[in-house]
Amino acid sequence: MKRALALSLILAFTVLFSFGAAAAANTLNGAGATFPYPVYSAWAYDYNKVTGVKLNYQSIGSGGGQRQITERTVDFGASDAPLDPAKLDELKLYQFPAVIGGVVPVVNIPGIKAGQLRLDAATLCKVLLGNIKYWDDGDLKALNRGLKLPHEEITVVHRSDGSGTTAIFTTYLSGAYPEWKDKVGSGKAVKWPTGIGGKGNEGVANYVKRVNNSIGYVEFAYAKQNKLAYVLLKNAAGNFVEPSFDNFKDAAATGDFDPDKNFYLWLTDAPGKNAWPIAGATFILLAREKTEANKRVVKFYDWAFKNGDATAEKLVYVPLPASLKDKIRAYWKDKGI
Amino acid sequence: MIEQLRVKFARRGQAFGLAPSFILPLKGKILKRALQMGIGPKKNTADILFYGLTALASFTVLMIILGVFFVLLKESALSIREFGVIRFISSTDWNPVTESFGAATNLFGTAVTTLLAMVMAIPVALGIAIFITEVAPSSLKGPVGAAIELLAAIPSIIYGMWGLFTLAPIMAEYIEPALQSTLGRVPLLGILFHGTPMGIDILTASVVLSIMIIPFTASISRDAFNLTPSVVKESAYALGATRWEVVKNVVVPYSKIGIFGGAVLSLGRALGETMAVAFVLGNNHQITSSLFDAAATITVTLANEFTEADTNLYLSSLFYLALLLFVLSFLTLAVAKFFMLRTERRHSR
Amino acid sequence: MTRARMRKLESVGALALCSLAAFAGLFWLVFILGDVLVHGIKALHLHLFFKDPVPPGMQGGGLRNAFVGQLLITFAATIIGVPMGILGGTFLAEYARGKWMARIISVLSDIMVSVPSIVIGTFIYALMVRPFGHFNGWAGAVALAIIMVPVVVRTTESMLTLVPWTLREAAFALGAPYYKVITQVVYRGAAAGILTGVLLSIARVAGETAPLLFTSFNNNFFSTDMNGPIASLTVTIFQYAMGPYEDWHRQAWAASFIIALFILVITIIGRTIVKMRYDKG
């Protein structure tokens, strides 16, 4: 009796796990940036229905995406911060963009609605550095004539975890304002001079919503979904622009993605007339020697480029322009994937 | 006969790479005992196998502890070489851009949340223990005790989630503003309560943590109280002492070592708690005077950043943090165990 | 006279405070469990058990993958951890009873019970994830097993010690070798207690999250492949509760409700067994 029980247990166990092993060939594992997680998982869900392939994407952050593909613990990595060609050669990786997004400074000042507050890079930096302490500071007033700003202390909300959003944002600030570059610099996680930290885009969005007279930065999709008050930013062409699909597309269109550099490009301060200054592409990283897995990953993105634009826009992401998609397909072909 | 077997064992031991000098005295003693028990050596092959199996299993505990220590040591070697021990512990820098890492902010977060939780939990836990042992009618003793122990069985992730969704808004809207407008006005004490009450901060994390450790502390204190011989209590009553006086002057002094051990054990538990604080602490590497600020404990830093770390030094520094936590909690728990063993020994005498 | 009254008053006041503390403890229990119950039951739906997750922002879907993954990991951990724990406890209570070595190992086990579980997670990451080249369910199972072993070791040891020595002597007198005495006499005498230890250790690991974060990782799809990343309820709760979507929050509550229910039932069964078996005498 006991022996029979034990035997059947062991049998059930082996059957269960050997069955599982057989299913592995049909799976792809990816990990990385949190920002494109909603759109990747929506694509993967549809792709699974069409082809039966299970693409498991886990949002652990851009740093994690780079780490895990470098250690080859996943089939592909994803990162909001592009790696430069030298680094890619060193780590033996390929890289291509998948979708465009942007970072949006958001504020919570009672009485001020979305799109009312205007900022330029220098003022934004001074606020984030803690040099401007109150909302009715002279610099802010000069940019916003006619807007009633309260004499309240500013609370800065930033990311507490490593993040591609922070990388894009701080790259923009470093490029636009030298003092930022000297004092803080750019990266996925930086040492913030002031403020409170929220985990993930959702954490920052949550804090900004809750804390009066605060300013933070989130990915566009989060600003939109949480109905946060975004600001207008002065771009390279000198215009105050609002974050919108068209202005992101404008930034993407003027960006020169070069396949020879593995598409390495920061889309910050793009030259277009209406270009949103803090845009960025989010990238896919592939291990060069994993030929077979790469073919399957690329097949997925090829499918997504063809069929996924509507899904992406529904989730407030900007699909890549058609010309860039062609460049990427040529890049795949060139690399023999 | 014993001698023959010992030689046989020694050969077997050598086959497994063990020195005969290690095997001989060990097996000799056990065997002698086995023979005293009347086990004939002829039937021994299966017995020896079983003996080996059980010994191996119990030594895995030892192996795991050593394994954890040495693996973490090896993984953090890079960071140890880079930052040393003193500099790592004392540096408040946690800067992935310049790859300069220090544990001080994490140690600060761990120490403050743990201590605050202890301060809040111990009086309540002692109250519960006194209630169960001395106050409650016997019909209530069982159910209340069982309910408190169920509180200990709830997994920490549920405490964390409850803290984020239910407790944090209550803290932000009612409790923290109330504290700010009362205690926050008191000079000196006021610095503990400045800033914007957000509910996701050191105070909320400490409250969740304290709710988590109350049951441990309470049930250990209760066990310690129960060890007080009733003769001693009865003689105090006979002298005319009130119930509270018996508790204060007889029961508590009698079991103080046990209570202390229990408190240190709870401290050890609180040090290593991850999920209950990860939701509500805010994860910000800073040393702050205000309880309304976010902070980071070692555990929360590990949970948030372990899969994030992109450079080798970063990952190694996280392993270094894990090593620090392991050593810290091991020592704390060992101290707790020492005191609890002392009470046990006193009572078994 | 007044002095006696003062003392009496002090006594009543202090003991009232203690009662208040006890009710504060009960209050938290009712508050937390009630909250989980209310939110959890509202979100309960058959889809939760029979559907896999849909992408965030989309309505519907369930957590079938996480339920199955959690069962697999816990089951595998039990298979690894329980025999090892029982055998280890046997050694301490039988062969090494009263030896300094046994005392050291049992003290170490007691310490191990409270060692931070996240440290075990990092340990297994270094041992079983990086060398294997991928996150895998087995790593999660081993991490949980490591947490189980000391619990089972300690309960087994104390339960075996409770079995009267005379019982063993009777068996020895019949000429049985020690291992037979242990497996057929001592284990039988302590079966209820050992079972309780096993149940409590399962309850202990079923709610663990931290050791799974870096080992079994997570999976959006249904998978029974223990060699790859596999979903678990607890990690899913962490992800969903921290996420920005209302639908995720609902499912996280429901999952918490199920886990809490499972653990409380197991704990209560375990305690009842002990009570029935050992409290009589």
Image (cartoon, coloured by chain):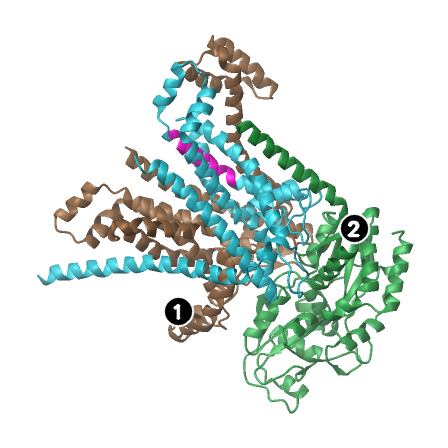
Chain colours: A green, B brown, C cyan
The residue indicated by pointer 1 is B189
Q: Are marks 2 and 1 in contact (CB under 8 Å)?
A: no
- Given the image, on which type of amino acid does mark 1 rest? Leu
Query: In front here: C230 or A154?
Result: C230
Query: Residue A319: which quarter of the image?
Result: bottom right
In the image, is A21 to the left or to the right of A193? right
User: Which dot marks residue A91?
Assistant: 2
**Dot 2: chain letter:** A
B234 in magenta:
no
Q: Secondary structure at mark 2?
A: helix
Q: Residues within 10 Å of mark 1 (few under 14, many from 20)?
A: few
- Given the image, on which type of amino acid does mark 2 rest? Leu
Q: CA distance from mark 2 to mark 1?
A: 53 Å
Q: Secondary structure at mark 1?
A: helix
Query: Residue A173: which quarter of the image?
Result: bottom right
Q: Main secondary structure of the magenta part?
A: helix
